[in-house]
Amino acid sequence: MNTLTIDGLKAVISFDEEAGQFRGEFLGLNGGADFYADSVEGLMEEGRASLRAFLSVCAENGIEPYRSFSGKFLVRIPETLHADAVHTASARGVSLNDLVRDAITHEITS
């Protein structure tokens, strides 16, 4: 995955061809905090500066800087996959929710 952790927060890194630089964007914030640089060291430096500026603006305006997550989301999948997932969960003696949670955990930690 193209991510960097800066001051405890993950940022997705991509290459902006127009700018000819790498672009970082923090995840899990209530607004945009992006930054550009042409090296990893530059991304780290610019990322810290962007994050400080974002958090400062949030504090000045009484805005919660971090997104909250409910722990619930809707996923649309083909009916056959849904049926296969229910059957697999049943065969393993777990709920569909547990099967999906474990699959997502596996993908994130692999």
Image (cartoon, rainbow, N blue to C red):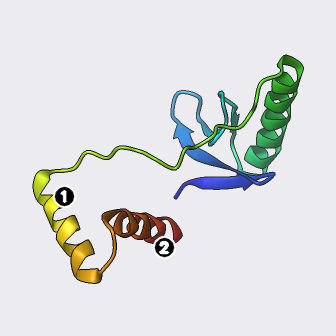
Q: Amino acid at mark 2?
A: Ser
Q: Is residue 61 left or right of residue 69?
A: right
Q: Nearer the viewer, residue 54 or 73?
A: 73
Q: Where is mark 1, residue-wise?
A: 82
In the rendering, which numbered label is found on residue 110? 2
Tell me residue 47's x, y (percent). Answer: 76, 41
Residue at image coords 17%, 71%: 87
Question: Which residue appears farthest toward the top when viewing the image?
Answer: 61
Q: Is residue 62 above or below residue 50?
A: above
Q: Is residue 106 left or right of residue 7?
A: left
How many dots with numbers? 2
Q: CA distance from mark 1 to mark 2?
A: 23 Å
Residue at image coords 42%, 70%: 102
Q: Is residue 25 above or below residue 59?
A: below
Q: Nearer the viewer, residue 93 or 33?
A: 93
Q: Is residue 50 above or below residue 2?
A: above
SS class of the residue under badge 1? Answer: helix
Question: Which residue appears farthest toward the bottom when viewing the image?
Answer: 92
Q: Nearer the viewer, residue 91 or 8?
A: 91
Q: Amino acid at mark 1?
A: His
Residue at image coords 36%, 63%: 100
> Would you identify the image quadrant in which residue 97 lies?
bottom left
Residue at image coords 10%, 58%: 80
